[in-house]
């Protein structure tokens, strides 16, 4: 009888464990999860705060970091992630035009300013004839850099080229300034080159190289309507435009709590502004 009773108790324990564990597993699997693709670490603080807000509503954010700007939009279009947050409007427009991705801007996040930096001069008026200025070699950021230099009076651009001019569109260059194009992460690092008079760099890459944009820049263009293409965004698949779960993520992001992170916490404080 003792052996039989022990067997019954053993089987009962297994049964309780099975249903208890199954219940926990089912509960875990039922938690809605949204995968968000990032590039670098600059935006992570805002998404960490968003994740905290959403966790109170039973929604989980999974943040996935990519090391190449060409990957997150492809991953989004292929359904490997649900949203991404790394690019501005102009970059997305070029990606969609070039690759046919069915993705679009779901919401604005921040505006990173481009600054002009130099270890040789303190004002762009000090540029000498034939000096070299380094800018980014990708079309959208490079075009934006040229617009920054135009706003500072360094040269004039063909106005018919809109927000994406190239070096070939410089039409009035009184000091014969030479434009050197390199990979965006390397621009700020060229300042120590004897041949570099100045450089136009993304504030995020300045920070990653140990610089302080708001203190070091010798010129920062005032924000106006022309900056709209360069506002960073949350991108999603067109088919998810009315997805209620995605809408909750965006509402959580565009909150006062996240705005406070952007304005007051590193690394975004002093290099970016809330853009919603």
Image (spheres, grey):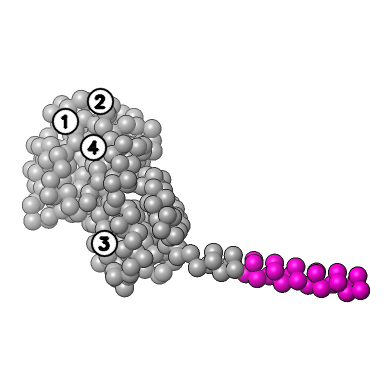
What residue sits right under mark 3 in the picture?
A: 105
Query: Does residue 146 appear in this view?
Result: yes
Query: Which residue in the structure is indicated by mark 4?
Result: 115
Q: How crowded is mark 1: few (under 14 residues within 10 Å), some or many (20 or more)?
A: some
Q: How far apart are the alpha carbons under marks 2 and 4?
A: 15 Å
- Give the camera-side residue of 128 and 122: 122
The earlier-in-sequence mark between 4 and 1 is 4
Q: Is mark 3 on a helix, strand or loop?
A: strand
Of the two numbered discs 4 and 3 in the rendering, the one whose residue sits closer to the viewer: 3
Q: Is residue 61 visible?
A: no
The local secondary structure at tag 2 comes to loop
- Crowd band around label 2 with a 10 angstrom C-alpha radius: few (<14), some (14–19), many (20+): some
Residue at numbered disc 1: 124
Q: Is residue 18 magenta?
A: yes
The stretch in magenta equals: 1-22
User: Quadrant location of the N terminus?
Assistant: bottom right
The residue depicted at 23 percent of the width and 35 percent of the height is: 116
Q: In x, y percent, where is residue 200?
A: 25, 39
């Amino acid at each position: 009888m003792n052996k039989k009773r022990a067997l019954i108790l053993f089987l009962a324990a297994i049964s309780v464990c099975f249903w208890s564990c199954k219940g926990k597993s089912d509960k875990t699997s039922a938690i809605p999860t949204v995968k968000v693709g990032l590039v670098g670490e600059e935006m992570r603080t805002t998404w960490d705060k968003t994740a905290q807000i959403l966790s109170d509503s039973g929604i989980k954010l999974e943040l996935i970091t990519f090391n190449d700007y060409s990957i997150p939009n492809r991953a989004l279009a292929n359904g490997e992630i649900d949203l991404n947050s790394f690019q501005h409007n102009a970059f997305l427009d070029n990606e969609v035009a070039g690759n046919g991705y069915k993705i679009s801007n779901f919401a604005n996040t921040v505006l990173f300013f481009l600054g002009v930096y130099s270890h040789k001069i303190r004002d762009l008026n000090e540029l000498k004839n034939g000096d070299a200025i380094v800018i980014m070699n990708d079309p959208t950021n490079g075009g934006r850099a040229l617009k920054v230099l135009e706003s500072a009076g360094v040269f004039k651009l063909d106005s018919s080229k809109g927000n994406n001019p190239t070096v070939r569109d410089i039409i009035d260059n009184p000091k014969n300034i030479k434009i050197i194009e390199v990979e965006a992460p390397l621009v700020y690092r060229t300042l120590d080159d004897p041949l570099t008079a100045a450089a136009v760099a993304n504030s995020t890459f300045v920070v990653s190289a140990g610089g302080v944009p708001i203190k070091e820049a010798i010129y920062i263009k005032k924000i106006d309507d022309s900056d709209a293409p360069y506002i960073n965004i949350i991108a999603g698949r067109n088919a998810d435009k009315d997805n209620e779960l995605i809408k909750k993520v965006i509402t959580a992001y565009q909150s006062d709590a996240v705005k406070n992170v952007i304005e007051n916490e590193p690394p975004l404080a002093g290099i970016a502004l809330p853009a919603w």
